[in-house]
Amino acid sequence: MTATRILVLNSGSSSVKYQLLDMRDDTRLAVGLVERIGEETSRLKHTPLTGGGESGGESREQNRPIADHDEALKAVAEELSRDGLGLDSPELAAIGHRVVHGGKQFTEPTVIDDAVLKEVERLIPVAPLHNPANLTGIRTAMALRPDLPQVAVFDTAFHTTMPESAARYAIDVETADAHRIRRYGFHGTSHAYVSRKTAELLGKRPQDVNVIVLHLGNGASASAVRGGVCVDTSMGLTPLEGLVMGTRSGDVDPAVIFHLMRVANMSADDIDVLLNKKSGLVGLCGDNDMREIRRRIDEGDEAARLAFDIYIHRLKKYIGSYYAVLGRVDAIAFTAGVGENAAPVREAAVAGLEELGLAVDGELNAVRSDEPRVISPEYARVAVAVVPTDEELEIARQTYALVANRVGERND
């Protein structure tokens, strides 16, 4: 297969993130972001990473109105062309799209056709914030390059291996099945990548390692991965369940919703906004940036301290529960913005869990690095690791593997 480039697109409601990679050696050729699409002033920042093109590797920025995703992707295509990396290049093998919700049906990367589009559209009720934007990006890319394979890589796919005992909620089965109510899980590309990289860090095969992955960003999720296979995860029907997050509550008693409806006269939409956008760390202390929260703690701010303590308490509960689910744990891996950069979070999350074989070395934990690393002392029974995630690379690899296999099958 001569075409070795993959363009990865992550289309949000008002943004498009993109990366162009060469899969011969996983080299990034260009990265960029279009944000504030549809607003009075949009912003496109494009960075070629090859050192070629007009800018010699320097970022270029546009600040102008960009009406919709169609115009945004056309602008991206123009920027790539300026660097000799255009969408019309014969070296472009496929476009890989992040799709947040794939339900039970999509268990692996999938070449997009009309049937796939219809199914992703049918899943909009369980992913109303994400799937519509993902669909817009896909349809726009298909219009720009109708001859090129377009591949959907689903956030939920890695979690479809969960047993029914973990995926089912204890509600009436007919009601659950009729309305697709079950635990799906999210951040799947990150959990897949990090669990595999953790095994590599330990010098073992993924199938020989049990890992608890803690993806801690503004959105946060945990997973229990046994031998490379997900057996439980913290997010559920939507990304609201589980850990305390930047603006999301995570786990709450479902009766809180009924209580607010009755005593506060709040509508379903009001409560949706409360739990998704006005809760979590921002609801507890007014900040969802862990760096700012730690600064406030150092200055003696009690609200910030309580928010941090609640965040850590929930994190420890999931570490303990997934330890029980797995039975044997070889490693705990911290990843994403908070997990990779907030040493106090990592230290606090395992403090007091020495009986479970968990500890961090203070000096190792304090090191800042973009490389995967073990931060536990040599004597610790369970490795504690920091493993930077790379969801774009994971999407590109899955996309390229699928397209390469299809070409190989046609040539057989």
Image (cartoon, rainbow, N blue to C red):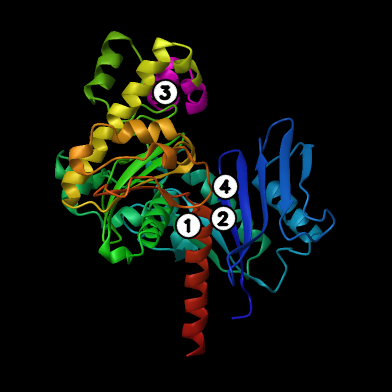
Main secondary structure found in the magenta portion? helix
Circle 4 residue: 11
Is 287 in the magenta? yes
220 or 305, which is in the foreground?
A: 305
User: What mark, if any, has residue 399 been given in the picture?
Assistant: none
Circle 3 residue: 281
Query: Which corner quadrant holds the N terminus?
Result: bottom right
Give me the C-alpha separation between circle 3 and circle 1.
36 Å
Circle 1 residue: 117
Name the amino acid type tagged 4: Ser
Q: Secondary structure at mark 1?
A: helix
Name the amino acid type tagged 2: Ile
Q: Is residue 168 visible?
A: no
Marks 2 and 1 close (CB-CB < 8 Å): yes
User: What mark, if any, has residue 138 been given in the picture?
Assistant: 2
* The residue stretch that appears in magenta: 270-294
Of pointers 1 and 4, the one earlier in the residue sequence: 4
205 shown above or below 289: below
